[in-house]
Image (cartoon, helix red, strand yellow):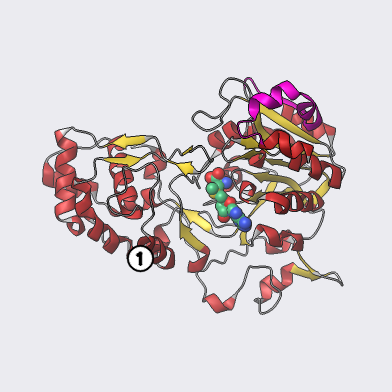
Amino acid sequence: MSDRFNRLSHKTYTSVPAEAVSFDLDTNNVSDHVQYAIEDDGNSSRVDLLALDGKEILRHSDVAPIPEIHWSIDRMDDAYSRRLGFDVLAWLDNLSDPDKEQILLELGPGNGAFKNEVDERITGYKTFGVCDKLYYPLTTLIGKIVDFEKLEKATGEVLSGTERELFCNFLYKILVIKEGQSHLDQFEYDQDVQIDLASNINQLPSWLESKAPLLTEVTCIPDHISGRDNEGNVCYPYKIQRPEKESFQKIYRAFSAYPNTYFRTELGDLYQALDIYPDNIFFAHFSDLNRLKDEQVDVMIGARSSVYVQGEAYIQFMTEMTKKLQDNGIHVDDSIRDNDGWCYRLAELQKVQEASGIPIYVVLGPPLEREDFCQDDIVPLSAVISKDPQKREVLRSSLCENSQLIPLDEIIADKGYLKKLDRTGKVINSLHD
Ligand SMILES: C[S@@+](CC[C@H](N)C(=O)[O-])C[C@H]1O[C@@H](n2cnc3c(N)ncnc32)[C@H](O)[C@@H]1O
């Protein structure tokens, strides 16, 4: 079994009554320490990140299970580097300054795994994360609940680590997808399960119990990698087949017949077993981040997070974020890849560049397999926003193989390249607007 799958959450956290604190940056009715982080600058109240340092407060409503099967919420260094197009930990390490602790703000940290990795492996940063909720993976939680040793003893069969992961993946998909739809390219989620688990994860064992009999019926589930239909809507053409192997089938049958015999009971409150890293995470909608104090962030990172802000709101948000950077700060963000690489937000970022007066560069690199429409040339992976040429040079020295850093304007001027990228025609059309 891989380390990652085996990893238990070391974190415990304080859950406080919902009425006690609001982290929505609303100055009404907030508890003392949040009040302390809020400075009244005369016109509006701004939140000082450093004043929030170490105030780890979480309510049950601040955490939720992953809402979509194609979402990844626990990517770490490797996945961030692949998506951003440069070795992100090496870059942070090279950027760190022994004389000054820098503020790193991650937009949308998922379950906080990457932020936690930075805390553990890189020095010189005070890290923060901002998100609407802390999302946790369900497969790893299911892996903690299922007593595989007992199952194996009862059946006389042994599953490898990968097979255990596959078993949990089947259970997870059967749990969240509406009965009878697991084989479809476009399916519905079981809303009762989604709503119930989001409100109380301690309901998970009873949902597993009621869905487990489906295990013997369902022979294929969708892979988490999604595709796009002709209109660009998410669909799931890639499938995972249930292994034919008799040992696997035996385990499936045993579990589906008497699921609760094979639950670990010693886990207690499942909120304590979640894979989440809540240190210095604060909760706010991205549109509320204008309330952050200006010029306090040295490094800002967004991976598959600000991409969810759409249209005009995206331009406003990214422009607003430039104000949160220190004068020589830097923001790297993969939201340039819209719709998983079906179009690229070159026109939107050009407007951010104009509005902020800060040059934007783009990391071009190899497309993500089964994601970007263009698979035979390098594609825009991330935007690099900084006034400081030296910061850009440090990033250039950490670029992944076959990646390059070039000015946004140069890409926009290369009409032949744009045509190649532009499956939907949206990129070129929006540049003409
Ligand atoms: C798909 S997850 C990506 C998580 C993580 N960066 C990763 O790659 O593993 C999207 C993240 O963006 C955050 N997010 C999306 N839209 C948001 C919004 N409007 N306001 C605050 N957070 C948002 C979610 O909370 C979540 O952390």
Residue drawn 63% across the image and 20% down it: 402
Above or below, comparing residue 130 to residue 406 in the picture: below
Magenta stretch in the rendered image? 401-425
Q: Residue 155 lies in what quarter of the image?
A: top left
The residue carrying mark 1 has its beta carbon less than 8 Å from ligand 1: no
Residue positioned 59% across, 24% down in the render: 366
Q: For residue 420: magenta?
A: yes
Please tell me how crowded label 1 is: few (under 14), some (14-19), or many (20+) other residues with Cα within 10 Å: some
Residue in the image at 14% along x and 45% along y: 153
Q: How many labels does the image show?
A: 1
Tell me where residue 427 appears, x and y as whole percent: 69, 35
Residue 192 position within the rendered picture, expressed as x and y whole percent measured from the top left: 36, 64
* Residue at x 18%, y 51% (from the top left corner): 256
Q: Look at the image and tell me whether residue 13 can be seen.
A: yes
Q: What residue type is labelled 1?
A: Asn
Q: Nearer the viewer, residue 287 or 44?
A: 287
Q: Please give left or right for residue 398 compared with residue 112 in the image.
A: right
Q: Is 366 situated above or below 67?
A: above
Q: Is residue 96 visible?
A: no
Q: Position of residue 429 (x, y in %)?
A: 72, 37
Task: Report the residue marked by disc 1.
Answer: 202
Q: Which of 292 and 338 is in front in this view?
A: 338
- Residue 349, given in percent of the width and then of the height, sits at 76, 41
Regarding mark 1 in the picture, which secondary structure is present there? helix
Query: Is residue 115 rendered magenta in the image?
Result: no
Quarter of the image that includes the N terminus: top left
Locate residue 103 relative to residue 256 in the image: left or right: right
| Quarter of the C terminus within the rendering | top right
